[in-house]
Amino acid sequence: MKMVPKGHRDEEVVTTASVLNRASKTFPIPTPLTEHGGAQIISVVNQKGGVGKTTTTINLGAALAELGRRVLLIDFDPQHSLSVGLNINTRNIEGSIYNLMMDESTRIDDYLLKTSVPGMDMIPSHEDLAGAEGGLMNVIAREKVLKRILAPVTDYYDVILIDCQPSLGLLTVNALTASHTVIVPLECEYFALRGVALLVDIIKKVQANTNPDLQLLGILATMFDKKTVHSREVLDRIVEAFPDKIFDSIIARTVRFPETTVAGEPITTYASSSTGAASYRRLAREVIALGGVK
C-alpha cells in the first residue's frame, strides 16, 4: 500500500462524510503517469464572487502537479486574481489570454508562463479581457474561441484548469464549451445556494447547444466553518440537492489562504503541512479517483 506523502494530514481535514456522520472515504495516491497529454479541461465556475474559485484553481493545480501531472492554469477573469495569486505583475507581461481571444494570428505557446510550482504553467489575464465579450459579438462560432486556442496544447498537458469570471456571460460560455467537466466552488452560506440552480441551467444549455459532453464533476464546499451550525446546515442542503455531485473533500475557512495571496504562491508550498494544503491534496486525489484527471 502506498503511503501518504509528508505534508498530507488527512486525519485533520474536514470532509462531507465526517460532518454528516457517514462512512469515511479514502483516496489513494495515484499511480505515476508514464505518458502525458490528452488534457482534461476543467472549468472552475460560480457566478458569485468570493467563493474560492481562484483559490481552488491555484491550489488544486499545484496539488495535481505534485502528483506528477502536467498542469496548465488559465486566468479567464478580467480581475486577473489568479495571475496576482501567482505573483505575476500583469502590467509587465507582453500579452495575455485577451490577445489570444481577439487575434487569431497569435499562438498560445507565446503566452505560456512558468509558475513557481514545477510542472504547472499558466496563461495570465488582464483587465482588457473585460472588453472581449463585446469584441467577440461578430465573430463566427464565438462560443468556441477558447476551445480553438487550447487545442494545440492538449497533447502536452494532463489537465487544464480555467478560472472563470464571476458571471455567466460569453466568456464563461466559452470556458464551458471548451471543457470536459465543471467544478463549482460553493461557499457554505445560505445565499450562495440560491445561484446554483441558475448555474446548472446554464450548464444544461451549453450541453444542448455547444458542448454535449460537458459534465458537472462536482460541487466543492468552501469556507466551511465546522464550529457553526449554519455551515453544517448549508452542507446538508447541498448534499440533499446534489447527492451524487458533492465532493467528499471540503475546504475549511482558514487565515492561511489570504496569506498565500500576499505571498504569491500556492498553500501547498507556502504552508505545506497546513490543513488547507492537506485539503487540496485530498481534493486532487479525489478528482483523479472520479476520473476528472487521469
Image: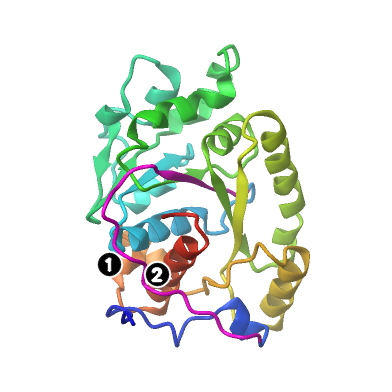
Where 137 falls versus 246 (above or below)?
Answer: above
Where 254 falls versus 34 (above or below)?
Answer: below
Residue at numbered disc 1? 269
Measuring 37% from the left and 37% from the top, which residue is drawn there? Answer: 154
Say left or right for 41 vs 207: left
Crowdedness near tag 1: few (<14), some (14–19) or many (≥20) residues, C-alpha within 10 Å: some
Q: Give the image quarter of residue 128.
A: top left
In this figure, which colouring scheme has been used for the structure?
Answer: rainbow
Where 285 falls versus 211 (above or below)?
Answer: below
Of residues 98 and 22, the one drawn nearer to the viewer in this rendering: 22
Q: Secondary structure at mark 1?
A: helix
Q: Provide the residue span drawn in magenta.
A: 22-46
Q: Secondary structure at mark 2?
A: helix
Residue at numbered disc 2? 281
Residue 249 at what x, y percent from top left? 53, 72
| Most frequent secondary structure within the magenta stretch | loop
Q: Give the image quarter of residue 248.
A: bottom right
Residue 13 at what x, y percent from top left? 48, 81
From this viewpoint, is residue 162 visible?
A: no
Which amino acid type is shown beneath numbered disc 2? Arg
Of residues 121 and 89, the one drawn nearer to the viewer in this rendering: 121
Where 289 falls versus 87 (above or below)?
Answer: below
Check the picture and name the quadrant holding the C terminus: bottom left
Q: Are marks 2 and 1 in contact (CB under 8 Å)?
A: no
Q: Nearer the viewer, mark 2 or mark 1?
A: 2
Residue 44 at what x, y percent from top left? 53, 50
Measuring 27% from the left and 30% from the top, which residue is drawn there? Answer: 109
Which amino acid type is shown beneath numbered disc 1? Thr
Decide which of tag 2 and tag 1 comes sooner along the chain. 1
Measuring 72% from the left and 54% from the top, which residue is drawn there? Answer: 196
Residues at marks 2 and 1, CA–CA distance in whole angstroms:
12 Å
- Please give the label number shown on residue 208: none
